Each structure stands twice: as C-alpha cells, then as structure tokens.
Amino acid sequence: MHELVEFAVEKALELGASYAEARFEEKNGTSLAMKNGNPEGLSILAEKGIGIRVLVDGGMGFASTNVLTKESIAEAVKKAVKLAKAASKVRNEPIRFSDEDFHEVYYEVKMRKDFRDVSPEEKLELLRKIEEEVKATGVNVPMRYLGYSDQVWHKIIANSDGAFIESVIP
C-alpha cells in the first residue's frame, strides 16, 4: 500500500496540485449480536480504500476509491484535481495551510491478547455470560440486546510536504 499512497501524491503533483495528501485506511473485524439470549448474527468487516486531498490554485478537491489499482487511483486523483480547480474559481480567498514540520513515523497499539485468535463461538460465549449477569440483576426489561465488535484499523498517510505516517490500532 505504501507504493499506491506515494503514487497518488506524485500523480497529483504531476497534474498541477501545489499540495497533495493520500490516506489509505483498512479495517478488518467482526461483530456479533444477541437479542434476549439468542444469537442474532455475525458480521465480518473488511473494508479498505484510499482518499486523495489536493490544493490547486487555492481550491481544494477530494476523491476516493476502494479499487486499489494504479488506474483507479489515477482516476480518483484526476477527479480531485478537477474539483480543486473548479473550487478555486469560486473562492474569494485561496486556501492556504500553515507551515509545519512534517515527519515519518510508525506506531501501533499492541494487544495483550489478539482478538483475531478468539473464535466467534468464544465471543458469543462472552455475550452469553453478560446476558446471565444482566438477568441476575432482576431488572425486568422487555428486551435485551447485546453486541460485541472488534476491528483492526490500519492507516497510511503521506503528503507532498514530506509526512509519512503509518499506524495499526486495534
């Protein structure tokens, strides 16, 4: 993904952007639901894409794609540049960013226990235990709805001013 993020920034500059930023995001995870003690469903989350933000002549444009090929990213960059050019024509004052020092950094949050190694059955058992605890309170409610979800969020952000940030957060 590093290569595609860098490609997006370079392509935007080639097309006349004075500033370009590309952000890749990927989320993977699961979600379980239980209603009145009965399992309702299991969802698998798997989504990813790249967003491109550009400045052209003081106008800002944004486009994104979840098709992660150079061709699709190039089309998204072209769209962002086109939108920025159109925006620059209707702005009274051009958009400018403050001067900042940009860095390269990688960080991640380490899991004590990786929830991806826990089966859906074990996660459902956790909901069942919570269900029993709720019922044991003696509070009478017409419906009990419990949900469990987890995800790992991976991001890569790069801009034309030299920033490169990557993170992995559960």
Image: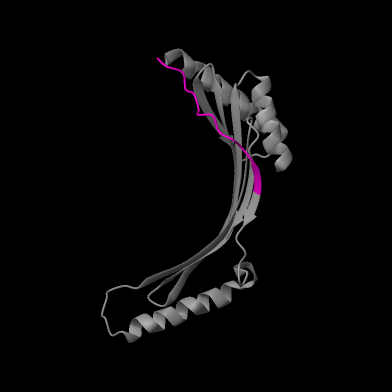
Task: Write down the quadrant of residue 168 in the picture.
Answer: bottom right
**Residue 155 % position (x, y):** 61, 48
Q: Nearer the viewer, residue 98 or 66?
A: 98
Q: Tell me the residue at 54%/74% (across/down).
A: 123
Q: Nearer the viewer, residue 120 or 167?
A: 167
Horizontal side of 9 relative to 100 (left or right) equals right
Q: Nearer the viewer, residue 52 or 73?
A: 52
Quadrant in which the C terminus is drawn:
bottom right
Horizontal side of 76 relative to 126 (left or right) equals right
Q: Nearer the viewer, residue 50 or 40?
A: 50
Quadrant in which the N terminus is drawn:
top right
**Residue 118 % position (x, y):** 61, 73
**Residue 68 % position (x, y):** 67, 40
Horizontal side of 108 relative to 92 (left or right) equals right
Q: Tell me the residue at 55%/63% (across/down).
A: 30
In the figure, 57 relative to 64: above or below? above
In the figure, 149 relative to 122: above or below? above
In the figure, 117 relative to 170: above or below? below
Magenta region includes residue 26: no
Query: Can the viewer see residue 43?
Result: no
The residue furthest right is 3
Task: Write down the quadrant of residue 81 in the picture.
Answer: top right
**Residue 165 % position (x, y):** 63, 44
Task: Write down the quadrant of residue 152 in the picture.
Answer: bottom right
The span picked out in magenta is 92-105
